[in-house]
Image: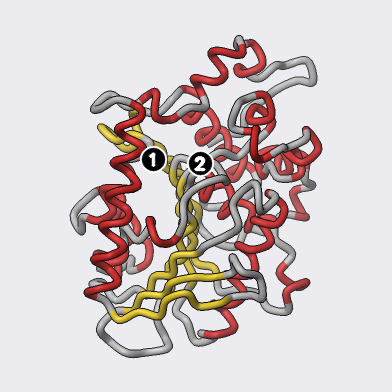
Amino acid sequence: MEARQAGPEARAPWQEMSAEELEKQYSPSRWVIRMEPEEVVRTFWEKGIEATKNARASRRCQLHVPYGDGQGDRMDIYFPDTESEALPFFLFFHGGYWQSGSKSQSAFMVNPLTAQGVAVAIVDYDVAPKGTLDQMVDQVARSVVFVQKRYPRNQGIYLCGHSAGAHLASMMLLASWTEHGVVPNLRGLFLVSGLYDLEPIVSTSNNTLLLLTLEDALRNSPQRRLDVAPAQHVAPACPVLVMVGEHESPEFHRQSQEFCQTLCHRGWEATFEKLPGMDHFSIIEDLTKRDCVATQIIVKTIFPRL
């Protein structure tokens, strides 16, 4: 992929939109064709709760493991049947526009991945208004550091985030690991239906609880930061897969495609996947299935010889 070319006078598509259209573009449930917006969100969280209950009942697990001193610094860790410290670890960061969701609603992929020999950690973080975006990014970094320190013989740490969680996972590409005292064994990132330039969010109702200033948004926008970072200051570390569902808004498609282009331009092994028939919610709901496209992509990335 080639990086997009844009002069200083170029305006992003969202800057030409009315407030009403911008709101629609950043409301994922309004682009789902299989059910009404309110129903799709409710169903998504219900399925997440059910998947989590099933995972807790059927898999060896450690629940509410503290990765820091804060009340929200908790993760659930699920293990495969084979007991070993030398496992690949898959860390999942839930979505919810940085203001809803939890690990108790998000264990969609636990059973399919643990069945393949992968340990799965579902990570909580303090959503708004309790947590600021800067604090959430720090929590995610500390959760990765915790897993690396607790399981130093791991066979690779893979980060996966959905929607807001994809943004948080992508911020780890810019993390200063030396400040945390350990460099995690990152082997791959799966960014699902994410946002990587947060400036448009400032002008939508999604910012009501976040209270992002423009400065906050730019500081926490990996797209914008990588666009201007000197190439020699950005060291590619692991492959990155950027995924989006077919039935998502043009803005979600644009953000995913442009972020993938920027990563490629900066030297990462980045790929873009548009999953046919999927929307913002079904793309994660389907991870409960061992044979779904996204699960197969994840497993083949972790175990390329399978």
Q: Position of residue 63 (x, y in %)?
A: 42, 76
Q: Is residue 227 above or below residue 92?
A: above
* Circle 2: element type: loop
The quadrant of the picture occupied by the C terminus is: bottom left
Per the rendering, the mark at residue 194 is 2
The residue that label 1 is drawn on is: 273
Q: Is residue 194 visible?
A: yes
Q: Position of residue 272 (x, y in %)?
A: 44, 41
Q: How is the image coloured?
A: secondary structure
Earlier sequence position, callout 1 versus callout 2: 2
Image-quadrant location for residue 207: top right
* Circle 1: element type: strand
Task: In this rendered view, identify the residue nearer to me: 15 or 203.
Answer: 203
- Identified at 35% across, 47% down, the residue is 45
Q: Residues within 10 Å of mark 1 (few under 14, many from 20)?
A: some
- Identified at 26% across, 72% down, the residue is 116
Per the rendering, the mark at residue 226 is none
Mark 1 and mark 2: Cα distance apart in space: 12 Å
Number of numbered discs overlaid on the protein picture: 2
Amino acid found under the numbered disc labelled 1: Glu
Residue 166 is left or right of residue 9, and the answer is left
Amino acid found under the numbered disc labelled 2: Gly
Q: Position of residue 68 (x, y in %)?
A: 64, 75
Q: Is residue 79 above or below residue 111?
A: below
- Identified at 36% across, 89% down, the residue is 84
